Image (cartoon, coloured by chain):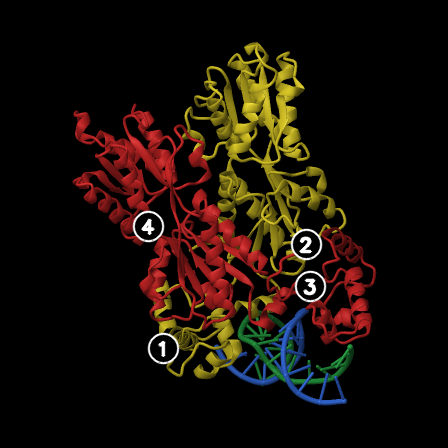
Chain colours: A red, B yellow, C blue, D green
Amino acid sequence: MTTTAQPHASQADPAASAEAAEAAAQAAAAGGDARGGSIAAVARRVGVSVATVSRVLNGHTNVRAATRARVLAEVETSGYRVNELARNLRTAESRLLLTMVPDFGNPFYAEIVRGIDSVARQHGYFMLLCDTGADAGRERSYFDLLRRHRADGAICLDPATVQQANRAAAHEPALPWVACCEFDPAAGVPYVGIDNFGAARDAVRHLIARGRRRIALINSDDHYLYAQQRRDGYLAALAEAGIEARAAWRVNLNCLDYDAGAQAAAALMAQRGGARAAKPDAIFAVSDTLAVGVVNGLRGSGWAVPDDVAVVGFDDIALAAQIDPPLTTIAQPMRELGETAARLLLKRLADPRANVPGVLLPHRLVVRRSA
Amino acid sequence: MTTTAQPHASQADPAASAEAAEAAAQAAAAGGDARGGSIAAVARRVGVSVATVSRVLNGHTNVRAATRARVLAEVETSGYRVNELARNLRTAESRLLLTMVPDFGNPFYAEIVRGIDSVARQHGYFMLLCDTGADAGRERSYFDLLRRHRADGAICLDPATVQQANRAAAHEPALPWVACCEFDPAAGVPYVGIDNFGAARDAVRHLIARGRRRIALINSDDHYLYAQQRRDGYLAALAEAGIEARAAWRVNLNCLDYDAGAQAAAALMAQRGGARAAKPDAIFAVSDTLAVGVVNGLRGSGWAVPDDVAVVGFDDIALAAQIDPPLTTIAQPMRELGETAARLLLKRLADPRANVPGVLLPHRLVVRRSA
DNA sequence: ATGAAAGCGCTAACAG
DNA sequence: CTGTTAGCGCTTTCAT
């Protein structure tokens, strides 16, 4: 049992295990004349008012122990369950949190979502999950789900949607949502993320410290802030080492999957023919999924990692340690990113006027064998 | 726009793009005296009854074109949005589908979930996602979410929960849910999955055809039906080739992640000392995540894949083609599994008495370099 | 084609 | 401590 606020927790009470609940439901389904029905039916059978039943169900203390016991007993045997549709209308809350993900096939997002789910559940909320990449039709704004009261608040992990919503936030600041991973402090929207500039600079510094000087960057879409910041971090590291940046060695991808990384790497190494010295000796990819593809693409083209080309990824998904060679990468605290996002949102919901901060979580360089 | 049944689709009408909707919301927030408010407020401002507004919102045809236009105009300028909490209570449906996953960090489940989400959305449903592995407390039965009307139906991907629910289904057959991947035809619960026995047999036959005879099995928990079926398929393939099965070469894991696979492989190869001929020359793992770990674990112990030990996985997740060597595996139609599960459930919801079948989807062996 | 009115099942004043 | 009652905002007969 959690210790955090959970208004509607005591329904049918702690004692009622899942097993017991199933049994009661069975009894009800078996169809003695004591069906579950509505709260009114329960009240009638017990011989109390609906208010009393409601009080018991919601764990209010102002009910005599004996009365409470009778109500609980009836609830138990009848298999009654509260109708949350009605409760939600009455309390004007859905107790649902909307999570928008660009692609939950990506382990990076999957782990963040687990963090969100975990905190949400602890606080009596469930998670509505939308894969924003899934419907090409773009459909109506996902934030309409908030306006329609389908969810009480939202967490957005999709950079494109974050940017769009940040613009809209100027006009309609009241919507309860928080940005995660992609964020703009200037937008006045609560957020969690990391120092993308610093993280990218750390990655490239590491490559430079390992003696690499021809460092390519495989980046995400340059429209995204996080991509711009990582690009700038990359550039800064090169600059401080006195290395000239080459535009031809910077590539932008609008897809972060393995194949995209593999193809980009192959293309990078195939640029203008012959001289080995004219090709990158290192690749920094802004996502581990990309980097896994890069390693694969390099191998496919006959290049050895890290001997010919060192590779650094980003995120530190579980897979990073499993591939050959294991991936050197920037670790993001994925779980905490999700948990923090959920906490910020919950705080905002608890007090709409609360001053919810933006928070930056620490990253760190994890050195393995790929660089 | 989809062509399938979608009762509440026309709210604010096709013409209203997301952009326009945002603009209208902005207008409303700006606070002219025409606030969004309730349907009653809209009706009052237009000078019609709530019934008429409701009809327009729901795309009923029996409204004069002129009236409809006036209502639509007011909805547009006021930024009114229907309150789905109220609609849901009135119509007695949440339009939410519950999806229970044992671990959505696993790419196999992630892809299935995308299939579910895609079909659900096409039919005007959203997805409530629960990671059943997430809360150790086990909590109340997830199916209580159905009884409480928090979701209209459920799809269960978690083998443990499927088994538990199959037992409960004997007592309470009315719950609208479908089993996916783990299923028991005898339980009378609609399901979708593959022929696990045949698939495992195919995998092991392939190994045998490649000349391997000392074949180990890394399986999931033996309590699960799919695990039993795959084990039996493995055993059948060995038997038909006249190979004696060795109990010491069968291992059961209750976790399918990379590390579990790596450790199991290392342990398998370390069994009782010296003789090479006393160790497996092939490993069949019942999940690609496990198999990826196996390849890594083998490499870590100095064994070459496939020369020393051939490896076959199961699922054909995207990653399978990216590792070195690329993984030979049994492909499951993950996307279709999810889509089919959703369709079966939707059919069940549309007609509670409908006879919803169990369906088996085809698998196939994908031969790459690991075996 | 439109309106009036009855609830859906619940929670929360307010009264006692 | 308990009961009565008024809605929450919507959809849907049933009239007109």
- Give coordinates of residue A45: x percent, y percent: 81, 70
Going by the numbered disc 3, the residue's amino acid type is: Ser
Q: CA distance from mark 3 to mark 2?
A: 11 Å
Instruction: Sort mark 1 into few (<14), some (14-19) or many (20+) by Cα contacts within 10 Å.
Output: few
Give the residue type at disc 1: Ala
Position above or below: A296 against A150: above
Q: Is residue A323 visible?
A: yes
Describe the element under mark 3 as helix, strand or loop.
loop
Q: Quadrant of residue B351?
A: bottom right
Q: Residues within 10 Å of mark 3 (few under 14, many from 20)?
A: some
Front residue of B99/A301: it is A301
Q: Are marks 4 and 1 in contact (CB under 8 Å)?
A: no
Viewer-closest of B302 and A133: B302
Query: Badge 2: few (under 14), some or many (20 or more) residues near its Cα, within 10 Å?
Result: some
Chain under disc 1: B
Numbered disc 2: secondary structure: loop
Say which residue label 2 marks: B140
Q: Chain of mark 4?
A: A
Quadrant for the N terminus of chain B, please: bottom left
Query: In the drawing, does residue B140 fall left or right of residue B10?
Result: right
Q: Which residue is disc 1 drawn over?
A: B30
Nearest-to-viewer mark from 4 and 1? 4
What amino acid is at disc 2?
Arg
Find out whether the residues at labels 3 and 1 contact each other: C-beta distance under 8 Å: no
Residue at the spot of label 3: A10
